[in-house]
Image (tube, rainbow, N blue to C red):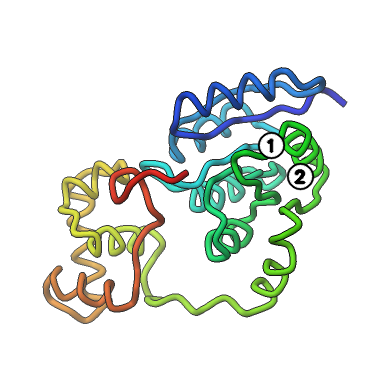
Amino acid sequence: MGPLRVLIVDDHPVVRRGMGALLGSFEGVTVVAEAATGAQALREAHLTRPDVVVMDLAMPELDGVEATRRLLALLPDTAVLVVTMFEDDDTLVSAIRAGARGYLLKGADQDEILAALRSVAAGHLVVGPGVAARLVGRLDAPAPPPAFPGLTPREHDILARLARGLGNAAIAADLGLAPKTIANHISTLLTKLGVTTRAEATALARQAGLSPHPTTSSQPKES
């Protein structure tokens, strides 16, 4: 077999370069690309077809959980290893449900990282020993039903951003779509929700707790 091909995804340049230097020093590992956002990660993964993606979670444009979900829909044989500062159960379970095979905290030593890379590439699940029991218990519980099952994933994305108070232009920039497309989506989701104004839709979304994962634009960075 050839070297393990790795894509690094992190919006902090210093962290990204440091991880690249570390992984590049491992025998049998080749860093094929880097990305600063979830959207860039999807493009680079499509171009380079990595064996493993080292994924941050809190990023602009597209958070790491949703990027993992979309990346694995595109490249189901690729393994995702999350490396993050988030250690709460909800974030861990969201990442694993999205398809991540590994979950390490930033600060893991180089032996742990190398072992995790090889393990997830071989199809194994890797989490810290203190998290494993909690993870099993949480994954055994059924996933909660979606708050708005009639909406498409894109409409969910837009409704979540309405809940954050974003206008059409900001939502369009965030999702990489035209403002007119956003307006059309909002008109459709208002009809589906049975409301007539975006304020009513926003209130429903907030009552349901619908919001995207944290990004640098919505709160201080903790990736």
Q: Earlier in the sequence, mark 1 or mark 2?
A: 1
Residue that numbered label 2 is attached to? 120
Q: At which x and y percent is residue 56?
A: 53, 41
Q: At which x and y percent is residue 194?
A: 22, 81
Q: Going 15% across and 53% down the picture, which residue do you hit?
A: 167
Give the side of residue 20 with respect to residue 169, left or right.
right
Give the side of residue 19 with respect to residue 184, left or right.
right
Compared to residue 147, the image places residue 110 above or below, namely: above
Q: At which x and y percent is residue 182?
A: 22, 53
Give the side of residue 91 with respect to residue 150, left or right.
right
Q: Going 77% across and 22% down the picture, which residue do you hit?
A: 26
Inspect the image, locate mark 2, and give the three-letter code of the amino acid beneath it.
Answer: Val
Residue that numbered label 1 is attached to? 52
Find residue 35 and name its label: none
Marks 1/2 in contact by CB < 8 Å: the verdict is yes
**Is residue 54 or residue 90 the one in the foreground?**
90
Inspect the image, locate mark 1, and give the three-letter code of the amino acid beneath it.
Answer: Val
Compared to residue 217, the image places residue 33 above or below, namely: above
**Is residue 21 or residue 47 the one in the foreground?**
21
Compared to residue 37, the image places residue 58 above or below, namely: below
